[in-house]
Image (spheres, coloured by chain):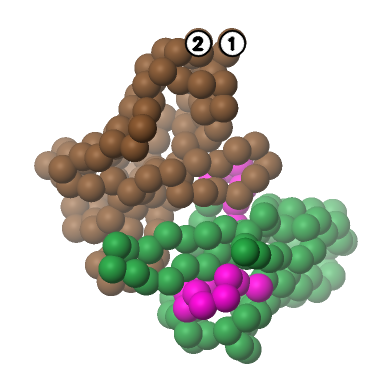
Chain colours: A green, B brown
Amino acid sequence: DAGVIQSPRHEVTEMGQEVTLRCKPISGHDYLFWYRQTMMRGLELLIYFNNNVPIDDSGMPEDRFSAKMPNASFSTLKIQPSEPRDSAVYFCASSFRTSGGYEQYFGPGTRLTVT
Amino acid sequence: RKEVEQDPGPFNVPEGATVAFNCTYSNSASQSFFWYRQDCRKEPKLLMSVYSSGNEDGRFTAQLNRASQYISLLIRDSKLSDSATYLCVVNFIQGAQKLVFGQGTRLTINP
């Protein structure tokens, strides 16, 4: 079975450019999460969706960041304009609720470098 | 104070040794607890959930102490393949899926 798919896997861009990260969750999962991981701050939740609706975006650092989920199989995280401090690994994860609880499945991540 | 705190390590132990990690959390109303494992330059993966009564999965034992607000992970008979970063994870809100991750504890098993 295909896991969570993210693209691109690596992105190098210059400060001020727009960056779009993409995610395809596992089919049937109704929750989708965007995380950012850095050495200094660890793994931080940016935003999560339930049934394509944003539930909590309190982790989005500022207005330069936006996320959308137009349908159950696709989500984007956009940074415009990008800054060097946005350099990090961005993970997408998905999950579904079962009687035993839930497990979040992470994609391989997008390693973003802003120069 | 961080919401979830872990000793970052690194822990370097010989193969076959027993190693234990602790993690503390700030919110006494926390509902669910997990240990995730992250290999170098890979994504985090669920290792095990942590139940109130404590639980075991093979060589791994997880325990929860609600009164003191800490979680532990014990690895017995450690293998080289156990080398990874172990992330303590807490769900603060019942019914919500918002997880808070600790910074992780880095473990290296030496031959």
| Horizontal and vertical percent position of residue A98 | 34, 69
Dividing the picture into quarters, in which one does residue B70 lie? top left
For disc 2, the marked residue is B14
User: Which residues are the magenta region?
Assistant: A24-42
| Horizontal and vertical percent position of residue A48 | 49, 73
The residue most toward the bottom is: A70
| Horizontal and vertical percent position of residue B84 | 55, 32
Local secondary structure at mark 1: loop
Chain for mark 2? B
For mark 2, does the 10 Å Cα neighbourhood hold few (<14), some (14 to 19), or many (20 or more) residues? Answer: some
Residues at discs 1 and 2 in contact (Cβ within 8 Å): yes
A55 vs A62, nearest the viewer? A55
Residue at horizontal 60 percent and vertical 49 percent from the top: B43
Q: Is residue A80 left or right of residue A24?
A: right
Q: Amino acid at mark 2?
A: Pro
Q: Quadrant of the N terminus of chain A?
A: bottom right
Q: Considering only vertical position in the picture, is B5 above or below A2?
A: above
Q: Is residue A23 left or right of residue A46?
A: right
Q: Is residue A84 magenta?
A: no
Dividing the picture into quarters, in which one does residue A110 lie? bottom right
For mark 1, does the 10 Å Cα neighbourhood hold few (<14), some (14 to 19), or many (20 or more) residues? Answer: few
Asked if both marks, 1 and 2, belong to the same chain, the answer given is yes
Q: Quadrant of the C terminus of chain A?
A: bottom right
Residue at horizontal 46 percent and vertical 49 percent from the top: B46
Q: Is residue A41 magenta?
A: yes
Q: Amino acid at mark 1?
A: Pro
Residue at horizontal 84 percent and vertical 70 percent from the top: A17
Query: Which badge, 1 or 2, is on the more N-terminal residue?
Result: 2
For disc 1, the marked residue is B111
Q: Is residue A66 left or right of residue B63?
A: right
Q: Considering only vertical position in the picture, is B65 above or below A4?
A: above
Q: CA distance from mark 1 to mark 2?
A: 6 Å
